[in-house]
Amino acid sequence: MESIPDNNTPVLVVDDDEGLLSSIKTTLVSFGMPEPALLSDGRDVMKLVREKPYKLIFLDLIMPHISGMEILKQIKEEFPDIECVIVTAIDEVSSAVQAIKFGAYDYLVKPLNSEKLIIVINRALERFNLRHGLSLFERKQSFKNLINPQAFKDVITEDEAMALVFHQVESIAPTDYSVVISGESGTGKEMIARIIHNLSNRSKGPFLAVNMASFNDTLFEDEFFGHIKGAYTGAVTEKKGFFETAQDGTLFLDEITELESALQGKLLRVIQENELYRLGSTKTKNIDVRILAATNRDINKEINKGSFRADLFYRLNMCHIKIPPLRERKKDIVPLARHFLMKHTTKTGKNIVSLSPDLIKSLLEYPFPGNVREFENIIAGAILLEKGKVLKLSSVHNLASCFENHKQHDEQSFSLAEIEKQHIYKVLDITHGNRTKAAKLLEIGLRTLQRKLKLFGEKPAATN
């Protein structure tokens, strides 16, 4: 069977069951959608895709001659922007994960629910249009043509690398897609998450930020799902969890890769089903929450190590924004330095009006392993020590030697890991070995700090 409309329809359905093809066509037309192209022989898919501008293709998993998974791989290799959905009578997690890993937008199990089918089509087409727009951002972007420049007023930047991030935010924010925001510690991932929320249709709803490194098995279910009165000893009243608290708004999951493996499945279930059970209850609660997640680690490496679930990642990573580290945004150094100078002289009442040339030169050469947060701490600390009207390198105190050491070893090109290690040791010195305080200053979870110390080796003076 082959039924190809004369107009360029955005949807192609491939299945050897001609009855199902006709049923899907009837469903789409009855919902006012364009008539889809229908094809029962998977061997003809690539020829058709090369001739017609399809945006979304439904592929039956098991067909004669060639499998839907094989066609999916071929489509994604040649036409990576086309959205694909695998349809199958077999409900297997492994097949779903493999399909999404190969680039499928979703994985549907027969029999197909008409309303869910229409929702998937609308969302997949919306994502195609979004991704097609984002592909234009591979070129340098300008701050001048932002639609909502006021939304970014609190982000101090002049570097084009951040203009790209802003344009991505403006494109992604109006959708309801889950987003993964990646970037090193201190780059401002939560700030970007808040801007996405403020520009979204959920802006009047709550924005709730949660650090995932803070939860063990006992705390997780109670904090995220809540409990009913009498659910356990001490549960004297009912309690809403984070999901219910963020209802109709945005839930920001910071340091998502720090969540224990055993808890990732529980999180995945709520995201997939949009419902949960409070502890002690047998009644489901419907959840309507947008998920934004952030990480300072390479999730793909964590998946390969088996410490992060691939199916959870694919659910979260409908869109991805990467915030570049400060060392790659040299045009931001001086504006940030002046901003922090004004901010902290106002706080302290000091009369410091400018930055010395040697300090600016050192700042431009310094790699900032702690990024913007470290930068602010450097300026704030120097202001406390400065006695004149010009902020000098000598007032940076213990960091002045760090600048000098960086200059002396420039030819050796310290690795990022070495720079990060020295920064962590420096913060531990400042906190007199208190890891909890150090983790807070570094803006990472305590378990993340402990893991890094295990990797780098303990600082002799460090204590719990």
Image: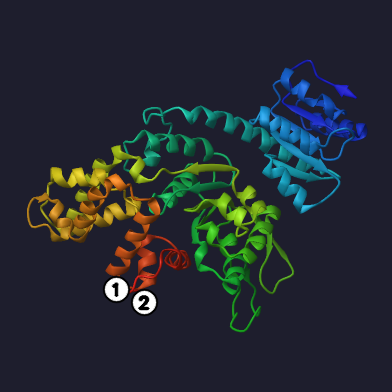
> Which amino acid type is marked by label 2?
Thr
Q: Is residue 23 visible?
A: yes
Density class for disc 2 (Cα within 10 Å; few <14, some 14-19, many ≥20) is few
The figure's colour scheme reads rainbow
Quadrant assignment for the N terminus = top right
Closer to us: 271 or 70: 70
Q: Mark 2: which secondary structure?
A: loop
Decide if residue 82 is on the left or right side of residue 433: right
Q: Is residue 192 above or below residue 164?
A: below
Closer to us: 201 or 433: 433
> Which amino acid type is marked by label 1?
His
Decide if residue 118 is on the left or right side of residue 365: right
Specify the farthest residue to the bottom: 233
Q: Position of residue 245 (x, y in %)?
A: 55, 61
Q: Is residue 274 above or below residue 65?
A: below
Residue 432, which numbered label? 1
Specify the farthest residue to the left: 388
Of callouts 2 and 1, which one flags the residue occurring earlier in the amino acid sequence?
A: 1
The answer to whether the residues at label 2 and label 1 have Cβ atoms under 8 Å apart is yes
Q: How many marks?
A: 2
Closer to us: 26 or 105: 105
Circle 2 residue: 463
Q: Position of residue 61 (x, y in %)?
A: 82, 40
Q: Is residue 312 above or below residue 19?
A: below
